[in-house]
Amino acid sequence: MVVGDLVTDVLASLGGPLTTGSDTAAAIRETGGGSAANTACWLSRLTDTTLVAVVGDDAAGRARVGELTCRTAVRFATGAPTGTVIVLSTPDERSMVTDRGANALLTAADIDAALPGARHLHLSGYVLFDPRTAAAGRHALTRAREIGATTSVDAGSAGPLRLLGPDRFLDWVRGTDVLLANLDEAYALVGTTPGVSSEVEPRELAELAARPGPEELARRLAGYATHAVVKLGADGAVWAGPGVVRAPGEPVVAVDPTGAGDAFAAGLLAAWLSGGTPAESLAAGAALGARAVTTVGARPR
């Protein structure tokens, strides 16, 4: 069971660097998106998966639900449109402009209606970022544990993590079985933010030189969850708790990074839930993440 956002992605694959204040050539397409929905679609190729989300009672919402390849417990809500995300993408990175729309209407009742029979609950961090849905997200983790299901949380995005506050987020996800974060998110939660102005004092440079690496970040995150995974993109990932395992990424020619982390999470969780070791789970995540970046869009095709 996966809980989180289902949106329309307006994906602009840029032909070069974004030219602010002017035109930038791009290939633009509209498709289904949302971190939770992406993970659910990838995961459904490997195991039975249900997506819990909310869309508007509109044409976009019906289209988004109709194209899902997983089981759905998606509510059509009146009074809010289906969420939309504008994704500006290059082969190396992506930037997003987000209107959560009906996703902000997710409630504890939506969780409770879908939870019976679930053996694992995966929660998108975006649910916790929004004060309108944070209580539902916390409820989901609590209820899943109460029925004996395992849990996982994807940290979502570094910017919202900093706005929410790392201490609050970590307190909410404490006790989760698997906590996933990319390097930026891991630094936002338990380390120093990467990316530094050249105009810094020598003392600050010394502090930055001592910045923790991925293995140490994973160890720190494992202080809050039973297992912690720090995703490193093409460089693989690190798993901590107990012990530390690092696995390489799969070498591929990247076309579009959108949804790669969601696919990685799906591959890793499917392997882990099937009894895979940390190394096997990391390898499965890397394989699915590599597959995701070789095509345009965030979903399996």
Image (cartoon, rainbow, N blue to C red):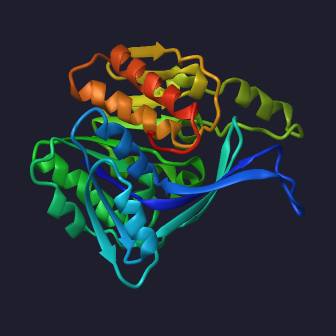
Q: Nearer the viewer, residue 268 or 287?
A: 287
Q: Residue at x 28, y 32 (%)?
A: 46
| Residue 13 appearing in the image | yes
Q: Quadrant of residue 258?
A: top right
Where is 44 relative to 111, above or below? above
Q: Which residue is drawn at 65% across and 24% down?
A: 253
Where is 300 relative to 220, above or below? below
Q: Position of residue 37 (x, y in %)?
A: 39, 51
Q: Which residue is drawn at 36% across and 28% down?
A: 268
Q: Residue at x 17, y 58 (%)?
A: 114
Where is 109 relative to 121, above or below? below
**156 left or right of 4 in image:** right
Q: Position of residue 197 (x, y in %)?
A: 83, 41
The C terminus lies in quadrant: top left
Q: Nearer the viewer, residue 208 or 113?
A: 113
Q: Where is residue 209 in the image (x, y as percent from the top left)?
A: 72, 24
Q: Where is residue 138 in the image (x, y as percent from the top left)?
A: 29, 58
**228 left or right of 261 in image:** left
Q: Quadrant of residue 55?
A: bottom left
Count the numbered circles shown.
0
**202 left or right of 27 in image:** right
Residue that sits furthest to the bottom in the current view: 79
| Residue 224 appearing in the image | no
Q: Which of 50 and 176 is in front in this view?
A: 50
Q: Nearer the viewer, residue 32 or 182?
A: 32
